[in-house]
Amino acid sequence: MSYLYLHYKNINHIIAIFIYYVHLFVILIVMFSFLKEKIKFNTSAPKEEVIAVELLADKLLVAQLTGSTGNWKISKFDYTILDSIPNLDDESIRRSLSRTLENLLIKSKITTKNVAISVPTKNAIIRTVQAPLMTDEELEEAIKTNSLWENILNLGSINFDEYIIYHQVVRKITNQNLMEILFVGSPQKDIDKYIDILENAELSPVVVDVRCFALKSAADINKSKRDLNKVDAILNISSDENYLMIIRDNSQFITEIFTSPKDITELKKNENSPDSKFEFLERYFLQVQEAINQFNTNSKKDGEKLVEKLEIVSPLNSVSNIISIATKILPQVEVKVLSALHKMIIPDQFKEKISSLNNTSVSSGVLGLATRKLDVFGYYKFVAAVKNINLLPNREKVIEKKKAQFKAKKFVLYVSLFTIIISIFFVRFINNTLQENKTTKISYNEIKSKHEKAFSELKKLIKEKRSIETSTGSMNTNSSNQLDTLKVLNAIKYSINKNVAIESISIKEGENVIIEGQSNSDIMIIKFIDKLKEYKMISGLELNYVQENDNGLKEYKMQFLIKNIEIEKDGNK
């Protein structure tokens, strides 16, 4: 019965350890699943790092941002001044620009290869048009044949096959069976020139935006939540492009502001002069006033929001004079210089470089472009369409390639995470096993020492027995009690095993023997008892108790009675 109790006690201990590790493993699996879901959630938005490159008439700018909306920080920023307005039709000039860009990236310590670039607004066709309400499949089928654009854009004899086109449904008017589509297109030959510059600089173009929308992204950087639904008006004044862009929701209204060749010459000549007055600006802003008034008049009729603020973008140094003239002609509108820097964190090493520009609006385009991310997972389908413009040729293939790369990275992340978890589990398991082995080794050494000590004492007793036999010549001369004691010790000698130690043997009244000791195993104690029971002189053998001490050893106590039966001198039964 005692043997069964000890046996099942060990089994229960093993089961308890097994259940503990199963629970630990389950907890780690749950943690892994939770982290997987978190990773999946976070990576559903695009995470491809992008640097922005902007080519202006006299400058080449690069920028990279970290953070996100409301918490942008400039991590890289630099620019170089070009000797002349680049003619991109000339291949040698494009090669020269590639080398200039490579040197600028090295100087800026930029290693990211993915690039967002913008093409001039004048190179693009931008329309928000109405079309009959269609399903996604019907819309794609109509686009494949170009029949949709030919019917709703009325652009004459344009060959749409020569254009890179971006489109997005921005609103469905179901009660009128109509929908509004944002159309943005640019000749592929113009886009290819910019891509050629980037690829020759060993960069990977992933986003091709239009500059007016990059400026809109810059304006949004400083917006608070309550300003997000306000109407944006951005005026670009330069020797290269002059236009007013008004954006309400996902609809944009772009008006070209006429400038004569003489005006353009004056702009180029005095661009860097802080005191230039530019006599034509009053005439210029009268055109702006007319465009804003027309927009506001139509908006009042439709119950829509009006233009309340005009932000100016210009490379001119005398921007304060421009603001003064604009404020005079447009008293009902707040006029200010567009700056993306107000809510942006600017490290000290970039402040001097940025302040060396003629005004803060010069950096707006490249910083707005730097907020763009490659739409790998369709995230921007759920935000404003103007934030998702991408005129990159074969962009679907690029997106699929980046998606595959991203999934590969995510798979490696999952495998690494799983490996770490399994490693933690096995390290814990091995540590526990080593600790148990160490404890067992200590216990074994203690038992071995006690066993050797008891066996030494037993040998002394046997020696004394033989000495008595020699001196008397016969065991028959000994007293009955002495003979019985020797018989018991002889029986113990041949019954004990190396895993059992005897701490004390006591004989009361000549016949009641009590043995106390320790063992590292319940089974070894049972074997000791079974061996003793084979001797006929031993009767009534009982195991009083077996209990585990602080060292993990089994302490035991047993007792039995001695029968007066002759046995052979060599200890055999």
Image: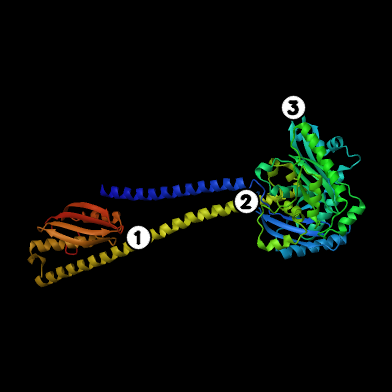
- Residue hosting label 1: 440
| Mark 3, secondary structure of its residue | helix
Mark nearest the camera among 3 and 1 is 3
- Residue hosting label 2: 410
State which tag comes first along the sequence, 3 or 1. Answer: 3
Direction from residue 250 to residue 541 in the image, left or right:
left
Q: Where is residue 259 in the image (x, y as percent from the top left)?
A: 89, 49
Give the Cα distance between marks 3 and 1.
83 Å
- Residue hosting label 3: 175
Mark nearest the camera among 2 and 3 is 3
| Mark 1, secondary structure of its residue | helix
State which tag comes first along the sequence, 1 or 2. Answer: 2
Residue at left offset 67%, top offset 48%: 46
| Circle number at residue 199 | none
Residue 205: in sight, yes or no?
no
Front position in the image: 237 or 432: 237
Front position in the image: 546 or 260: 260
State which tag comes first along the sequence, 2 or 3. Answer: 3
Q: Residues within 10 Å of mark 3 (few under 14, many from 20)?
A: few
In the picture shown, does residue 457 fall above or below 160? Answer: below
Q: What residue type is labelled 2?
A: Lys
Front position in the image: 343 or 413: 343
In the picture shown, does residue 268 fall above or below 459? Answer: above
Residue 344: in sight, yes or no?
yes
Q: How crowded is mark 1: few (under 14 residues within 10 Å), some or many (20 or more)?
A: some
Q: What residue type is labelled 3?
A: Asn
Q: Position of residue 182 (x, y in %)?
A: 78, 40
